[in-house]
Amino acid sequence: MERLWAPWRLAFIEGGEKPEGCIFCLFPKEGRDRERLILARSRHSFVILNKYPYNNGHLMVVPLRHAADPCDLPEEEFVDLQDTLRKSIGVVREVYGPDALNVGMNLGRAAGAGIADHLHWHVVPRWAGDVNFMPVLAETRVIPEHLDATWARMRPAFDRAFGS
């Protein structure tokens, strides 16, 4: 019998402790990028791994400004967010070599946003056949790479992309 190991999912499943306030506002201010899974920063945005990924390399591109809608961002911040998104797509392609990508933003809770008050882009690498029977039968996704390994694998490419 094979075992599936995804220990970070337990907190999600059990609804573990959540920080007070918006994590997208709090985490960049803490200066604990490795612990908080922050991969890169630009002037007005940052890139963070999704703690509950759909696939290896699933990340989010987030503005520093607390805004629920892209229309609420000043032009300079919106352009920075889009540039950060573009660089992030390039890094995911470089590091993981996916067959395709899902890139999307859920605006509002009814659209599926888990953190509806702070907009963010999702970048999800996809491979032909990456959806198997587990999500259908067991409501479980198999993510073979630990988040720490994903961070370590992606960070050098982000450093190059952002000139860090």
Image (cartoon, rainbow, N blue to C red):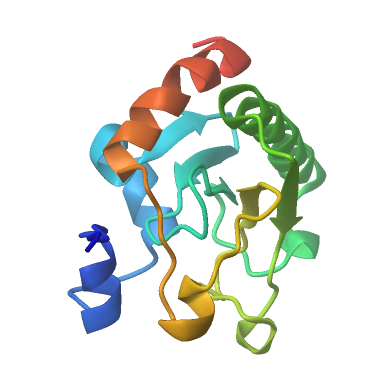
Among the 4 quarters of the image, the one containing residue 8: bottom left
91 up-or-down from 150: above or below: above
Residue at image position (56%, 11%) is: 160
Q: Position of residue 78 (x, y in %)?
A: 76, 45
Residue at image position (28%, 34%) is: 34
81 up-or-down from 73: above or below: above
Name the residue at the bottom extreme. Answer: 110
Residue at image position (62%, 26%) is: 91
Question: Which quarter of the image is occupied by the N terminus?
Answer: bottom left
139 up-or-down from 92: above or below: below
11 up-or-down from 60: above or below: below
Name the residue at the front extreme. Answer: 1
Residue at image position (53%, 47%) is: 59
Q: Position of residue 89 (x, y in %)?
A: 70, 35
Is 3 placed left or right of 68 in the picture?
A: left
Decide if residue 64 is in sight here: yes
Total labels drawn: 0
Q: Position of residue 65 (x, y in %)?
A: 56, 52
| Along the viewing direction, whichever of 54 and 110 lies nearer the viewer | 54
Q: Position of residue 75 (x, y in %)?
A: 81, 44
Among the 4 quarters of the image, the one containing residue 13: bottom left
Is 111 placed left or right of 20 in the picture?
A: right
Decide if residue 32 is in sight here: no
Is 66 placed left or right of 17 in the picture?
A: right
